[in-house]
Amino acid sequence: MALAFDEYGRPFIILKEQDQKTRLRGIDAQKANISAGKAVARILRTSLGPKGMDKILQSPDGDVTITNDGATILEQMDVDNQIAKLMVELSRSQDYEIGDGTTGVVVMAGALLEQAERLLERGIHPIRIAEGYEMASRIAVEHLEHISQKFDFGTTNIEPLVQTCMTTLSSKIVNRCKRHLAEISVKAVLSVADLERKDVNLDMIKVEGKVGGKLEDTELIYGITVDKDMSHPQMPKQIEDAKIAILTCPFEPPKPKTKHKVDIDTVEKFQTLRLQEQKYFDDMVQKCKDVGATLVICQWGFDDEANHLLMHRNLPAVRWVGGVELELIAIATGGRIVPRFQELTPEKLGRAGLVREKSFGTTKDKMLYIEHCANSRAVTIFIRGGNKMMIEETKRSIHDALCVARNLIRNNSIVYGGGSAEISCSIAVEAGADKYPGVEQYAIRAFADALDSVPMALAENSGLQPIETLSAVKSQQIKENNPHYGIDCNDAGTNDMQQQDVFETLIGKQQQILLATQVVKMILKIDDVISPSDY
Amino acid sequence: MAIEKILKDDATEEKGERARMASFVGAIAITDLIKTTLGPKGMDKILQSTGRGHGITVTNDGATILKSLHIDNPAAKVLIDISKVQDDEVGDGTTSVVVLAGELLREAEKLVAAKIHPMTIISGYRMAAECARSALLQRVVDNKENAEKFKSDLMKIAMTTLSSKILSQDKEHFAQLAVDAVMRLKGSTNLEAIQIIKKPGGSLKDSFLDEGFILDKKIGLGQPKRIENAKILVANTAMDTDKVKIYGARVRVDSMSKVAEIEGAEKEKMREKVQKIIAHGINCFVNRQLIYNFPEELFADAGILAIEHADFDGIERLALVTGGEIASTFDNPESVKLGHCKVIEEIMIGEDKLIHFSGVEMGQACTIVLRGASHHVLDEAERSLHDALCVLSQTVNDTRVLLGGGWPEMIMAKEVDELARKTPGKKSHAIEAFSRALVAIPTIIADNAGLDSADLVAQLRAAHHKEGCNAGIDVISGSVGDMAELGISESFKVKQAVLLSATEAAEMILRVDEIITCAPRQREDRM
């Protein structure tokens, strides 16, 4: 540890308890950080692409997750190292922004760090490297814009969208029925999309899963499913043209928030109180009935008596519905959430064409389907699958596909996948490097090499010779001046990604490059790591 | 420089070959553990719980065994999960699904050792599974139209399912019970309507199906023990003291006389309630909650049979069978639907008194009373019967039926082999491996029965070379027999679920190349 001494040879105390802290400075700090970043990237590298492998993650509580979604792997890995946490953040922000490409962005950042390490060894100052990377990323992003294509789709022609979603899904375990799932995702997104404003509110799409059945049984429901059943076993299981009262007040005697006591000291009081209570229940149910509701959905529980009264008045009811679901139901059915019985009015009721209860399997699992809603914009994707992990993984995959479809609706530019965009960018950056005088030139060239690592990992995971394949594709791209050549991961016989229909969104790719560059810059700028040492 | 540590202290990380090996070893260990329970001559396992009392369970039900294991290996957890799902979905085949998945992985391990990439194996397995499924689809028998034949199909399936369980001694008896019970459901899969009551004593043979409904309760004292043409009110209401539910209400009095007054009022209230209930014109009152002595007395005075504390399931079932509704308020007697049944009487099974409702309106529900020597026997009998009921109720919905005794596996293996021969490329190795994994199931069945599996399976394979052959393993005589003649059938739905979920699970485990185990959560020491 470096210490400062005064003229008498006594050490200055700069850091509190500095003996107990480890400190890395200068080139050592950078190298340590780079190696941590690389270690994270190395974990994800094998998950990239359609032939990428999965990871088993066992949580602190012993639950098992099997996934190949980059963001999920990193999230669940529970990393300890600071720099590794930055990489986790990186993948997470890609997930929030774009929803897809979470593995790619980390692999990219890892490659950039690896290249930076080499440059550092040659004595180039980290800031210069960072600057160079910045310039290179600008070239790459511009180039992406240049090679991107607009493509048309409409509510009738969803094929291109489906193709793009299929590219996303093909890297997941669900690729067995990617076509089916891609269609579901696209239809779901289109039904909630606002094509005028080019915006999609993904909150309107609910993804529900139930273990059992096969993946092929996954379906899109134009409505909402609630994992609840009718409060009374003898209530009707199917309601047509339902008018739904959505309540957040319990069918129970009132519980004022202020503390109070009702003292009973005479027989009369006792009896009036009893009558009051009965009347109260009666009133509550009557109010719902009066406004014309044919179904009551309540966030809270029911008293036995109220339950029977509801049943008696032929008013089916559902209790203990969660807040989020309640909101979705309100949106879907066009109803208002009513916090008090007094405020119930016919206008506040939601409407749905069909409400039915459906049971599954041999255990008495029941779900409530609310379909043909007044506002058909809310949809549910209902996933079935062999086991819990499969369902969870399918949920994640569907989420990715939904995000991709949304991005395309926001901005319909695409680039071709299979590493072709990276290769093309790499060529462009390489060519651009020579124009820069100064040390940055090296960094820009390193950036181009780093770009190559994504297709390289793709080839490696697909069992191809990475170097051979990459150089062949690269020369082909330059020779024919066609940026559509990529790595043929699926063994389809052609490496023209246009023919294979492998697309990715432009913003997704751009974001990947920008985010990766930013994080790498940040890591490179750190030259001092002070951490409490373990004792 | 040393590679930076990026995970927490106790976390472990296994990569590539090691990870794959860990998951193979885990999955195969589970398979080996459970495979001796497969088939009619499968053995049972004793499970001792770590909980208080170290209660033991004797079972041969795959799902039950796996559920009770505490497993650390993630791949093994996947297998346990599929078995659980199989149990929930179709109820039977919980052992087969794990064994098949394990065998698939065992074969995959060899292929991986021979340097075939897991992804290639997966795509081969997928093709094979698809091919196997279509092979089954071609050979299914569907007797939906012919009620008589269908019933015999059901009977055969029930016998096949039960033959691997403790009930195999009396399988005809139980198969009949199960089929009768399921036929009463008329296509619904709601097994709730079939009540199983376990009473130790007697032998398994004394078990019987009762068309009515049996409630495991006693009739209140001084009330009639037998009622004909009963009108039943099923209720869920407090019959102790009817508390005032308004929040914060409490009784505060200043003299003894007031206490007496309030008490009087309370009694009066209860009396009124009872009067209201009686005014429904009923002669039987069943409540989910307690009935205190006072109202009970009032009921007895009115000659009404009052049954207290029937549990929730009991109430629901009773409401279902008698056609009444569950009431909680009693103000308008004309609109409450009452339940009806011909006779209510107290019966004795063994030493226990039970209440028997016979001649109920809705014929859907029924009760199976199991008798047996000990609790363990009864528990296992219940599980076995549950399996049979599940399979049957699923078969009623999906009436396609296959032969059993290893026949479907051989059919699939043959078709998959054909496919392997036609497929170019490395995938064909994986497809071949799939067929080997399928053949492993009849092999295990034969092994468990103490037969010469190599010889039998070879004979079976030869027999299957002929078109339209019904050969399977006849465990009883220890030879290859005609499954159609022996009446060994299985439900298509079960077989399909086994095939698909086993392939899915194997695929999932194969795709893994890295296992990261987080540091276990530090638990507070409560001691």
Image (cartoon, grey):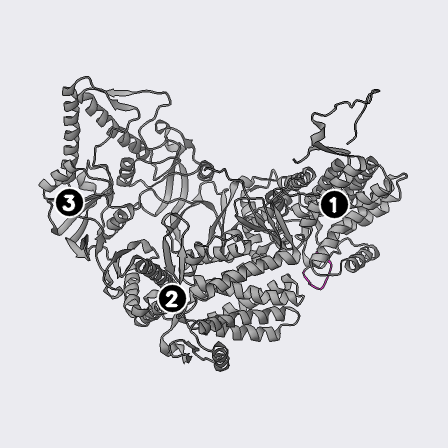
In the rendered image, residue A426, in percent from the top left (x then y), is placed at 80, 48
Amino acid under disc 2: Thr
User: Seen in the image, is B229 located left or right of residue B237?
Assistant: left
Check disc 1 and report the residue beneath it: B2
Mark 1 belongs to which subunit?
Answer: B
Which stretch appears magenta?
A490-497
Amino acid under disc 3: Gly
Check disc 2 and report the residue beneath it: B399
- Residue drawn at x 61%, y 75% is B422
User: Seen in the image, is B360 located left or right of residue A458?
Assistant: left
Q: Nearer the viewer, mark 2 or mark 1?
A: 1
A455 lies above or below B409: above
SS at mark 2?
Answer: loop
Q: Earlier in the sequence, mark 3 or mark 1?
A: 1
Could you say which quadrant of the image residue B484 lies in? bottom left
Amino acid under disc 1: Ala
Residue A176 visible in the shown view: no
Check disc 3 and report the residue beneath it: B220
In the rendered image, residue B130, in percent from the top left (x then y), is placed at 54, 66
| Residue A374 is inside the magenta segment | no
Residue A193 visible in the shown view: yes
Number of on-image labels: 3
Q: Nearer the viewer, mark 2 or mark 3?
A: 3
Quarter that holds the C terminus of chain A: top right
Q: CA distance from mark 2 to mark 1?
A: 64 Å
Q: Residues within 10 Å of mark 1 (few under 14, many from 20)?
A: few
Q: Earlier in the sequence, mark 2 or mark 1?
A: 1
A431 lies above or below B118: above
Q: Earlier in the sequence, mark 2 or mark 3?
A: 3
Q: Residues within 10 Å of mark 2 (few under 14, many from 20)?
A: many
